[in-house]
Image: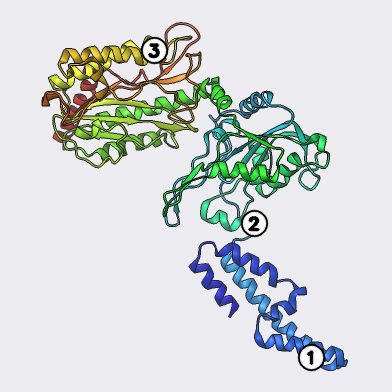
Amino acid sequence: MLVQVLHVLYFQQAYAHSQLQSIITIVEPMNHVFLACMWQRHDAVRVKKLNLYIRMKRTDKIQKTIQFSAAILAVYCLAVGIARDAVAQPSQARYYLAPRHAEDIPLERFRERRQKVLRTMSPKSIAIFFAADKRTRQNDVEYEYRQNSDMLYLSGFPESESILMLIPEGIVLPLSMDSSKIKHEALLFVRKRDINREIWTGAIIGAERATAMYGIRALENVHFFTVLSLLLQPHDSTKRRDTVFITTFPTSTIVEPLSGEIINIEREARLRLQRQYPHVVVRSQRRLIAELRQIKDADELRVIRKAVAITVEGHRAAIEAVRPNVYEYELEAIMEATFKQHGAEDVGYPSIIGSGANACILHYTANRRQAKAGELILMDCGAEFLGYTADITRTVPVSGEFTPEQRAVYNLVYAAQEAALKEYRKGVDWRKPHSKAVEVIRAGLLQLGIITQPEDYELYFPHGSVHYIGLDVHDAGNYTVFQPNMVLTCEPGIYIPEGSPCDPKWWNIAVRIEDDVLITEDGDPIILSAALPRKAEQIEAIVLSAANQRVRKSKKR
């Protein structure tokens, strides 16, 4: 009967594997014979009788009872063994664990980054970096997991439920955790391997493999609180740490749905930590991490260049597919398929494919509309490669040629971008390129009669045009002056939605041109996305050439 119940559990619930293993562990050993028997009502009575027989020294009946129980146990253990073999994974099962990518950031680079953080910390402090939370899409389906960017920057470790701890001057772990007696300045706490979980979601790296693959002493994450206590409340009070740096929490706030109250998880966590360790001060390293991440090292630049090159290929393929009556989602599919074909793991942000009126929506991502002849289609998309994302935008005439009004707006945005790009130089204030773009767009809108007052330019150019890119599409940075090896966007735009206070001939014209720019040590900036044409006639040539190829192919059929 128990075996049947176990089978039902297995087929009804995905997590039954771990529960079953726990049950089997309890009831299987020989020395738990009477515990197993107690699961049946009659066996409970038998145990009571057995105790009575012992007291009465009726040895013959004792022997018969034990023999009977042993026989029951033998049959039961056989059934349990069959059930275990049927529903549990064999202990020798091994699931594919992808190695680190050949083009990934070298481990030595991660060590250098951690050392930069450690050098800014006092010997009485520690720093904690949490992995990103898993996010539920709906019911029991999760979104594809993406690691917290700070965790990626300092360790490269990709799994959830992990924690990186940085410890100035290090800690010697208890022998039960580590027999090496080495002082560790960095510890990585990771998920325990679970064969019954791996069959559903893939190989778990685990502590042993994490240490080998990522060059950090890794422990199972159940040890995190023990280590934290050893650092914040050690037996030797002279070694007590008094400052904990926590830059980002996996989830900072949640909204209680019945009241609308915003619950600040970050504040609650800080208060709990300080209640447990009253002497501890909790601080953030956000500015420090931003300062480090805004300057890209040689390996980051190599990876970003690859992400940009992949994104250029995706845009080119999508531009070639632009034609009247194409659906936005068709172009999205072509764009993202090309990303994957060239090795990207994902998109760096949801793809923006807006046609007609949708092009006027800055972050439109529904991508369901059918593009009509004579309209514009704006495509703002970026591939993510090894955690780093590009960010490129092109605006394309659906029919292959810009109308006079569309061309006028397009050329104005192009001129604004050209003026802005000249300011991407070492030592220049980061706001200068945007100011130059505003000057050009303001003058152009006045000249075209779209606005009559200079300040009204904001109606049609409502956003900034400079931001860092890297591990995030809006990457960490302190926004001061440009420094060598910063990578930023240059993205002026004009958007004239229907109903705007101007001649209706301009309505639903929206243009954005966005490129990724590298600041150099001296001289001109490098436009990393320069391989993708920007001029109006170049865009038209790509669309018309692709259209002619489609015609030739159809004639051959």
Marks 3 and 2: in contact by CB < 8 Å? no
* Position above or below: 336 against 312: below
CA separation, marks 2 and 1?
A: 40 Å
* Residue 494 visible in the shown view: no
Percent x, y of residue 461:
28, 22
Percent x, y of residue 463:
33, 25
* Position above or below: 76 against 524: below
Q: Which residue is drawn at 55% across and 41% down?
A: 266
**Quarter occupied by the C terminus:** top left
Q: Is residue 36 left or right of residue 519?
A: right
Amino acid type at image mark 3: Lys
**Label 1 SS:** helix
Amino acid type at image mark 2: Gln
CA separation, marks 3 and 1?
A: 95 Å
Q: In this view, does 383 lie to the left or right of 178?
A: left
* Residue 13 visible in the shown view: yes
Return the disc, 2 or 1, that comes first in the chain's sequence.
1
**Badge nearest the viewer, 2 or 1:** 1
**Badge nearest the viewer, 3 or 1:** 3
Return the disc, 3 or 1, that comes first in the chain's sequence.
1
Q: Which residue is drawn at 81% across and 90% down?
A: 52
Q: Mark 3 points at which residue?
A: 432
**Badge nearest the viewer, 2 or 3:** 3
Q: Mark 1 points at which residue?
A: 64
Q: Mark 2 points at which residue?
A: 92
Q: Is residue 435 left or right of residue 256?
A: left
Indicate the quadrant where residue 454 lies: top left
Disc 3 crowd rating (10 Å Cα; few below 14, some 14-19, many 20+) is: some
Disc 2 crowd rating (10 Å Cα; few below 14, some 14-19, many 20+) is: few
Q: Which of 269 and 177 is in front in this view?
A: 269
Amino acid type at image mark 1: Lys
**Label 2 SS:** loop
